[in-house]
Amino acid sequence: MSLSLALANQPHLADALAITRLTLHVLAATVWVGGQLVLAGLLSTVRGLGADAPRRVAVAFGRLSWPAYWVLVATGVWNYLAIDHGAATTAWNVAFVVKMACVALAGIGSYLHTKASTPRARGLYAGLGTLGSILALVLGVALAG
């Protein structure tokens, strides 16, 4: 192995722009994905606070989570533009397409959850939104290589 190849494969620190981009992406994911998991865990307690409490908490969470979702989308595009597409493998490209489908599922499922009028529909759409969110997160980690 040549010295230049050995040095190229050594771990290194990201530059300031990459740190900013990735930090924004991870912070937004903590709000979007983490918030969904926290709310699911707190739902039984919130229900005990009154009949209107789950709706009020959901509306308040939406004021935080939807901007986080759009930050995820924007920084995701930024992440995509920052990679060397010539070096991407077929497996990476397939995983990326599947991740984009999961991002869409997360957004659509979560949006439909906010519009659903029955408990069954709310549960179904919440489940789809959360499933899409978790799968997108896992695929994002895989795509980071």
Image (cartoon, rainbow, N blue to C red):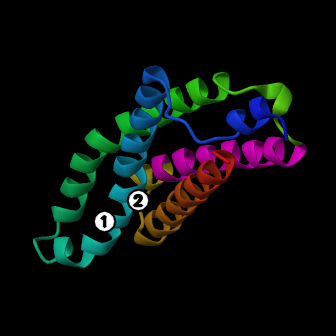
**Where is residue 131, by image quadrant?**
bottom right
Q: Residue shown at 48%/24% (left/top)?
A: 15
For residue 92: magenta?
Answer: yes
Give above or below for 82 relative to 68: above
**Where is residue 103, by image quadrant?**
top right
Mark 1 or 2, closer to the camera: 1
Q: Is residue 9 left or right of residue 117?
A: right
Count the labels in the image: 2
Q: Is residue 3 left or right of residue 17?
A: right
- The amino acid type, in three-letter code, at marker 1 is Val
Q: Residues within 10 Å of mark 1 (few under 14, many from 20)?
A: few
Q: Picture coordinates of residue 90 (x, y %)?
A: 89, 43
Q: CA distance from mark 1 to mark 2?
A: 23 Å
Give above or below for 73 relative to 96: above
Q: Which residue is mark 2?
A: 117
Q: Picture coordinates of residue 37 (x, y %)?
A: 37, 65
Q: Residue shown at 73%/43% (left/top)?
A: 96
Q: Name the foreground residue: 70 vs 50.
A: 70
Q: Secondary structure at mark 1?
A: helix
- The amino acid type, in three-letter code, at marker 2 is Ser
Q: Residues within 10 Å of mark 2 (few under 14, many from 20)?
A: few
1 or 2: tag closer to the N-terminus: 1
Q: Which residue is mark 1?
A: 38
Q: Residue shown at 76%/33% (left/top)?
A: 3
Q: Residue shown at 37%/58% (left/top)?
A: 34
The circle on residue 82 is: none
Q: Picture coordinates of residue 139 (x, y %)?
A: 65, 53
Magenta range is 90-111
- Farthest residue to the right: give it: 90
Q: Name the foreground residue: 31 vs 92.
A: 92
